[in-house]
Image (cartoon, coloured by chain):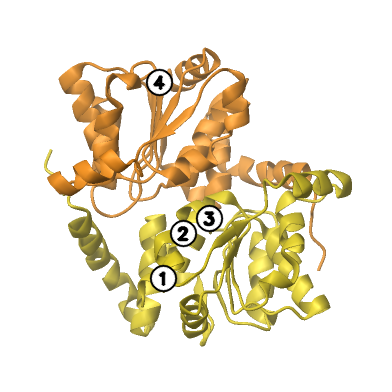
Chain colours: A yellow, B orange
Amino acid sequence: MEYIIEPQKIENRSMEIIRPYLDRLNLSEPEIKVYSRIIHAAGDPDYANWIRIHPTAIQAGCQALQKGADIFCDVEMVRTGINKTRLGAWGGKVHCLISDPSVIAAAKVTGATRAMTAMRSFGDKLDGSVVAIGNAPTALFELMKMMQETGIRPSLIVGVPVGFVGASESKDLLAAESPVPYITVLGNKGGSPIAASAVNALLYMN
Amino acid sequence: MEYIIEPQKIENRSMEIIRPYLDRLNLSEPEIKVYSRIIHAAGDPDYANWIRIHPTAIQAGCQALQKGADIFCDVEMVRTGINKTRLGAWGGKVHCLISDPSVIAAAKVTGATRAMTAMRSFGDKLDGSVVAIGNAPTALFELMKMMQETGIRPSLIVGVPVGFVGASESKDLLAAESPVPYITVLGNKGGSPIAASAVNALLYMN
């Protein structure tokens, strides 16, 4: 069977195939890049119907990353998927505490998820950062609560938790009430590759 | 806003929500577990229409893993997503060579993807193993070629590469011509969480 084996050709052809799905949406070029990377990561053009990008999200995210902002993730798969070479060149690092022994111990005591416990323990390090949530609705709910209670303000929230219990609600809340710019995907879909691809779109934009 | 924060309750409720989507499909209980984990990981019940499980795949995969078979992945995100504690208890390890310096160097020389180069370099270690491909169609095409050319036989192939260039074709080929049992998702959808969730379903089954 004939198939393309050159990485750049595969990516270029993918982007060509995705582009027509975006034509009717009146997107800016930077928005097209974010949409395309997400659809590419999911293999699913239906994402075009559910992605929501706050008007200043791309600019805010790019500026923060270029100034060396760190990225805080809910789960290890998001950390794994982010291009750390590109990020590191600007001075940023990716953090995830879900497997941290103190987080695991604390979550056992409270009975809450490790993802929300880990988010809480990032504390005011989240100020000025990029937060990328690809799995746990509870982490996004917790972040919204922290912003309300403590006044911390990330530069950008990429909030795309996935699933049938709380995911849709947490993203509706983000889109309706976030005090900072956000990128999200409404509904049940989402996941670690979606979070990582949105962040990588910003990293590749500069 | 009220939401569930206890991990086990979230998972149980998710599985309750997913179950009705599977009712019309006449699945066995082990198949329901694989379908449910995949749909849970994607937040997308449409996967029920595209998942294909070879009749002996679940049994073959479970038996291999319980005997300590290793798992070979195309990308790091698949490795990250697999429950290594459960696997390690049976003696198995997860391998990925996509960031191996010799693979990167070899891929530069040939111009092919790192994922297919990495798959080729696993060689006859793949015999009796579980292969989990969550990203790169080229890795799955290469594995099919290796099985034909060299006679290596994994115990199970979880082949769910994602995207618009080669993914659907590589999975059609797997379903049509694989000499060993497989789990796949036809069409463009797939991805690392899909591969990891299918493998984890097998790990949790015992």
Is disc 2 in contact with disc 3, using a CB cutoff of under 8 Å? Answer: yes
Q: Is residue B38 above or below residue B130?
A: below
Q: Which mark is residue A79?
A: 3
Please report, as a chain letter, where disc 4 is located: B
* Neighbours of disc 1 within 10 Å: few (<14), some (14-19), many (20+): many
**Looking at the picture, how far across and down is residue A52, in whole percent?**
52, 76
| Farthest right residue in view | A109
Label number found at residue B129: 4
Q: Quadrant of residue A135?
A: bottom right
Q: Is residue B18 left or right of residue A121?
A: left
Left or right of A39 on screen, residue B167: left
Residues tagged by mark 2 and mark 4 found on one chain of the structure? no
**Viewer can see residue A77:** yes
Residue type for callout 4: Ser
Residue type at mark 3? Answer: Arg
Report if the CB atoms under discs 1 and 2 are less than 8 Å apart. Answer: yes
Give the crowd class for mark 4: few <14, some 14-19, many >=20 residues within 10 Å: many
Q: Judge if badges 1 and 4 mark residues of a common chain.
A: no
| Neighbourhood count class around disc 2 (C-alpha, 10 Å): few under 14, some 14–19, many 20 upward | many
- Residue bearing mark 2: A82
